[in-house]
């Protein structure tokens, strides 16, 4: 959006994106979990984010080198990191019983919190701890849902694999949409909690439409990737479409629609890779228009692609992004052309 005046000799080398993973965790009543980050956080301060974090070679296994193309692909190390970080940040353990993989592993509050802090402090390996409790991290149930690579104008960059995970659908008769909730496996989904103020001050399940409306009203901060993904899922996980909020049949149908959507597109949403890039400033309100079709410089010759049809509009302020909106690219470009023709 501004011309480059420096020569290639004067340019600083690009910072290497750190591998990270996040989960769009869907509750038993098809709500989505967001965590409120502390104001002093080194990444996304004061924003609401999906649970997730950086890959750890100590906890998750060997992390691909920067020159390795698999550094930007879904793999076991990304999946284990996503589940571990979700547990550390929210207290929700996405693990199944070893003797019955169809059932979630249920632990008491004290046992869960002790393990959560021990893992965070690297006193014990996450997978080792889960196995000691008779479980297995439920990596196979994670559904890849886009990858995001931080733009090059941001000093601290990430290559983030996003996943969807469905907690078991609530039974008829469940009353608390946030938890604890009885589910089909007869386990209890504990109420998500903050990590004690280390990185987050609150954890909460809400419908995606509610999170979006709170962002539009300026009540919370959502960065473009979070807003964009909530926008994509909102039409499918809308409480207005459920005659009986906890009707398991309707909840299951909504989930099937989400899975079908993730498989759609060219490339499918599970394979899309996006690195937002500024296209221009919108004349009517001065917001930045971000394109999502490019995968970033690390993957420019890989054949990976993002979303060529949509853009994100955003006003960047000191406290974070505001007035975020997702729009069809063709409509935004048409509007700009028509506005210029009237001048």
Image: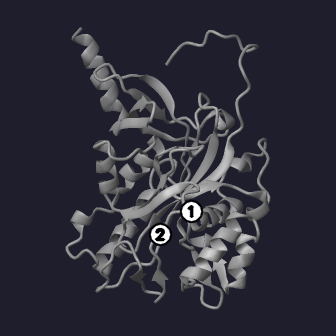
At mark 1, the secondary structure is: helix
Is 274 placed left or right of 31 in the picture?
Answer: right
Which of disc 1 and disc 2 is earlier in sequence? 1
The answer to whether residue 235 shows anywhere in this view is yes
Residue at the spot x=59%, y=31% of the render?
Answer: 154
Q: Residue 6 at x, y = what percent?
A: 66, 11
Q: Nearer the viewer, residue 122 or 286?
A: 122
Residue of label 1? 89
Marks 2/1: CA–CA distance:
9 Å
Determine whether 41 is above or below 15 in the image.
below
Determine whether 315 is above or below 110 in the image.
above
Quarter of the image for residue 302 reads top right
Q: Nearer the viewer, residue 272 or 58?
A: 58
Is 69 placed left or right of 281 in the picture?
Answer: right
Is 267 placed left or right of 60 in the picture?
Answer: left
At mark 2, the secondary structure is: loop
Q: Residue 162 at x, y = what percent?
A: 55, 55
Residue of label 2? 192
Q: Residue 143 at x, y = what percent?
A: 54, 63
Q: Residue 202 at x, y = what percent?
A: 45, 60
For the C terminus, the quadrant is top left
């Amino acid at each position: 959006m501004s011309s480059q005046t420096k020569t290639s000799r004067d340019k600083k080398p690009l910072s290497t994106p750190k591998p990270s993973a996040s989960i769009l965790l869907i509750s038993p009543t098809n709500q989505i979990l967001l965590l409120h980050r502390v104001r002093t956080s080194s990444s996304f301060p004061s924003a609401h984010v999906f649970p997730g974090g950086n890959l750890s070679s100590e906890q998750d296994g060997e992390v691909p080198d920067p020159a390795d193309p698999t550094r930007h692909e879904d793999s076991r190390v990304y999946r284990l990191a996503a589940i571990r970080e979700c547990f550390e940040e929210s207290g929700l353990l996405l693990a199944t019983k070893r003797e019955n993989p169809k059932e979630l592993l249920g632990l008491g509050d004290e046992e869960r919190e002790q393990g959560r802090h021990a893992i965070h402090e690297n006193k014990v390996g996450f997978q080792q701890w889960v196995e000691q409790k008779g479980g297995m991290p439920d990596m196979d149930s994670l559904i890849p849902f886009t990858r995001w690579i931080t733009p090059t104008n941001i000093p601290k960059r990430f290559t983030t694999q996003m996943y969807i995970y469905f907690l078991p659908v609530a039974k008829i008769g469940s009353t608390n949409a946030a938890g604890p909730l009885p589910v089909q496996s007869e386990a209890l989904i504990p109420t998500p909690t903050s990590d004690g103020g280390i990185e987050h001050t609150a954890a909460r399940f809400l419908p995606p439409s509610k999170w979006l409306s709170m962002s539009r009203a300026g009540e919370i901060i959502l960065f473009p990737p979070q807003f964009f993904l909530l926008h994509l899922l909102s039409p499918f996980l809308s409480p207005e479409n459920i005659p009986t909020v906890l009707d398991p049949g309707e909840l299951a149908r909504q989930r099937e629609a989400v899975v079908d959507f993730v498989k759609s597109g060219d490339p499918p949403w599970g394979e899309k890779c996006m690195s937002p890039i500024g296209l221009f400033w919108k004349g009517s309100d001065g917001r930045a228009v971000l394109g999502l079709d490019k995968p970033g410089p690390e993957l420019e010759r890989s054949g990976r692609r993002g979303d060529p049809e949509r853009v994100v509009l955003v006003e960047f302020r000191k406290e974070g992004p505001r007035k975020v909106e997702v729009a069809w690219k063709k409509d935004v470009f048409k509007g700009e052309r028509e506005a210029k023709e009237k001048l």
